[in-house]
Amino acid sequence: MFARLLSVGGFTLLSRITGFARDMLMAWILGKGILSDAFIVAFLFPNYFRAIFGEGTINPAFLPRYAALRAKGEHNAATVFGDRVFSWQMLAQLVILIAGMIAMPWIVRVLAPGFAGNPTELALTVHLARITFPYLILTLVVVQLSAMLNAIDRFWAAAAWSNFLNLAMIATLLASPWFPNAAEAAAWGVLLGGVAQLGFILWAAAREGLSLRVSWPRWSPEIREFFVALGAVTIGAASVVIAPFIDTVLASFLATGSRTALYYADRINQLPLGVLGIALGTVLLPEMSSRLALNDRAGSDSAQNRAAALSLFLTLPFAVVFVLIPDTIMRAIFAHGAFDKNAAELAALGLAAYGVGLPAMALVRIVASTFYARHDTMTPARVTVTAIAVNIALKIVFVWGFHLGIFGIALGTAIGAWVNVGTLLFLARKRDLLQVSDGFKRALFPILLAAIAAGAGAWFGTQMGAFLVQQGRWHEVAMLAFAIVLGGIAYLTIAFLFRNTLPLGRLTRAAAP
C-alpha cells in the first residue's frame, strides 16, 4: 500500500503544486472583485456536477464491482460491465449538458442570488459558466477509465491527469491580454484542460489494454445493481454538493471578494487533503474490495488500519499549523498583485476554520470504504445527508446569527466533517465491520505529539522570520519559510524517535493487526 500511496500522492502533490501556481496567477491577475467572483462561481458548475456524477459516484458504485470481477478473473464480464455503465452515463451526461446550457441564467440566479443586484456580474457569470460547463462531459471518460486503472493497481495516471487542467489554465491566464478579459481566459483554460485530460487518460488506458465503447444502453441485472448503488451514492454526493452551494449563496450576500477569499482558503486546505487524505482513500477502496471478494477479512482490516494511521499522521500536523499561523500562510502565498493583504487576511479566517475539520475530511473516505467495499452505498449516503444537514444549519447560525462571515461558513464545514466521520465510525463498530488494531492505538500518542511539535515549530519559525527579516517585500515569505523549516524539523524529529510505533514503521507492513 505504501508504494502505491507514494505513486498516487506524488502525482497528486505535483497536481497541487501546479494548482498553487494556477491559483497564485489567478490571484495576481484576477484579484478580489467582480471578475474573480464571477469566474469562481462559473468554475463551480463543472465541479459541482462532477462531484455528483464523477468520482463521487463512479468510485463507490462502479469500482468495487469492477474490481471484484477482475479479482475473480472474470475479465470479459468486467469489460462488458464497464461498457454498459459508460453508455448509460454518456446518455445521462448529454441530457444534463443540453439542459444546463439552456437553463444557465436561471441556474446562476439560484446558485448566487446575491448577483441578481448586479446585472453585469450576473451576465458575466452566465457567459463564463457556459464556457466551463462542457468540461463535465469531457471528464466522464476520464473518471471511469481512472477507476478502471485503479482497479488493476495502476494508480499513477489517475492521479496525474488533473495536472492538465492547471497547466491549461496557467497558459490561458498568461495569454489573457488576447482575451476580452482575464476571467474569460481562465474559463477557456478550463475547457482546454478537459480536452487535454481526455487525451492523456485515453493514452494511459490504451497502454494497459483498457478502453470504453459506446453502444445503445442495455439493461441487465448487473446494471440494475449498479444503478441502485448509484442512486444511493448520488444522494450522498448531491448532499455534499449542497454544502458548498450554501457556501456560495451565503458568500454572495457578504462583501465583494468573500467568495474569492473562501475559495483560496479551501485551496490551501485541499493541499494535504488531496495529496494525503484522498490519495489514501483512492488506494484503499480497490484493495479492500479485492480482499473481501476473496474472503480475506484480516487483510482488508489491516489495510484499513494502516490507511487510517497514515492519514492522521500525515494530515494532523497541517491542521495544527492552519489553526496557528493562517495569516502567515495566506499573506506569503497570495498577497501579491491584485490580491492585497486585506484579502489574504480574510482568507486566513477561512483557513483556520477549515483546519479544525481537516483530519475528519481525510478520514471520511477511509471509514466510508468499510461500507463501499461491501457494496453498501446506502449507509454512507444516509450519514452524509445527516452530516450535511448539521453543516448547513451551523453555517446559517454562524453567518446570520453570529455574523462570523466566511469563518462561520468554513467552521460549519469542519464540524459537519466530524459529524460525518463520527457517525460512520459508530455504525461500522456497531455492525462489527471495522476492527481497530493494537498497532493503530499505539500510534495515536506519537501521531498527536508529532502534530503538536510541528505546530510549535511553525509558530516559532514565524517569530524567527519576523525578527531576522524586517518589513518589506520578503518579510512574509521569510516568516513562512522559517515556519516550514522549523515545523518540519520538529515533526521529523518525533517521527524518528517513535519510528517503530508510527504508521511509517510497523503499520506499513502487510502483517495483520
Image: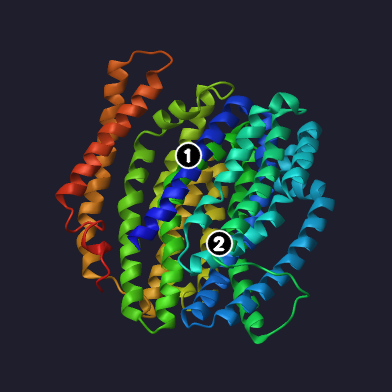
Query: What residue is rendered at 47% in x and 36% in y?
Result: 349
> Label 1: which residue?
17
Left or right: residue 140 versus residue 485 is right
x then y, percent, for residue 326 = 41, 34
Three-letter code, disc 1: Ile
> Which quarter of the figure has residue 304?
bottom left
403 lies above or below 144: above
> Label 2: which residue?
207
x then y, percent, for residue 75 = 55, 79
Q: Residues within 10 Å of mark 2 (few under 14, many from 20)?
A: few
> Which quarter of the figure has residue 425?
bottom left
Three-letter code, disc 2: Arg
Name the residue nearer the viewer: 187 or 426: 187
Furthest-bottom residue in view? 221
Furthest-right residue in view? 102
x then y, percent, for residue 288 = 41, 73
Name the residue nearer the viewer: 272 or 327: 272
The answer to whether residue 152 is seen in the rendering is: yes
Quadrant where the image shows the N terminus: bottom left
Furthest-left residue in view? 497
Left or right: residue 232 versus residue 352 is right
Query: What residue is rendered at 65% in x and 76% in y?
Result: 227
Left or right: residue 388 versus residue 249 is left
Q: Residues within 10 Å of mark 1 (few under 14, many from 20)?
A: some
Query: What residue is rendered at 62% in x and 81% in y?
Result: 225
The answer to whether residue 254 is seen in the rendering is: no
Left or right: residue 19 versus residue 367 is right
